[in-house]
Amino acid sequence: MPVMTLEAFAAYHQPGRTIAGLDLGTKTIGLAISDRSLAFAHPRKVITRKKFGLDAQALLAAFGDEVEAAVIGFPLNMDGSEGPRAQATKAFVRNMDKLTPVPFILWDERLSTVAAQRTLIGMDVSRAKRDERIDSAAAAFILQGALDRLTALL
């Protein structure tokens, strides 16, 4: 089950399970995990990308047994078209489908990193610490948007 809509997930959801949020970059994977009530996205440690097999292993370890689905940032162009990064995200999801039954939900991530950056600046986080945290903050921003929409569906 590689890709699922948020609407389909609402019917599939089992109470008490969590959702992961991913910001897939070329060098890192930002990770966030929801609470069990699906109200809040909590940033987790960034996964440094190596090879797909190692990246997938690290993600699956982070998912554990409680993650029911993963919301992955889908990097559309500003005009809504799909570029190379969107295609790379789809390829990543297809490869993950071979390793896990966890469904992926593609979520429009336009400007999520900008919003996460502004939030970190507003919190007076130093530039060095922002660089460490930006990908997981973006993942939390992506996941929180999906959680807020999901609340209306459940």
Image (spheres, grey):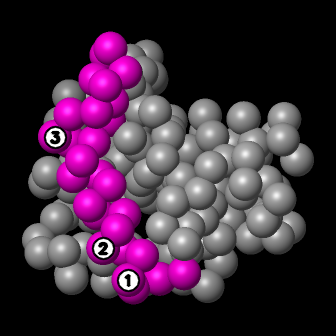
> Helix, strand or loop at disc 2?
helix
Dividing the picture into quarters, in which one does residue 144 lie? Answer: top right
Membership of 9 in magenta stretch: no
Specify whether 132 is left or right of 38.
Answer: left
Residue 11 visible at all:
yes
Amino acid beneath label 1: Lys
The Cα–Cα distance between marks 3 and 2, rounded to whole angstroms, is 16 Å
Q: Residue at x 79, y 54 (%)?
A: 10
Tag shown at residue 84: 3
Residue 132 visible at all:
no
Question: Is 25 above or below relative to 16?
Answer: above
> Helix, strand or loop at disc 3?
helix
Circle nearer the N terminus (3, 1): 3
Q: Position of residue 21 (x, y in %)?
A: 50, 53
Quarter of the image with the N terminus in it:
bottom right
Segment tinted magenta in the rendering: 75-101
Amino acid beneath label 3: Pro
Q: Where is residue 109 in the image (x, y as percent from the top left)?
A: 41, 32
Q: Name the residue under label 2.
A: 95
Q: Mark 1 points at which residue?
A: 98
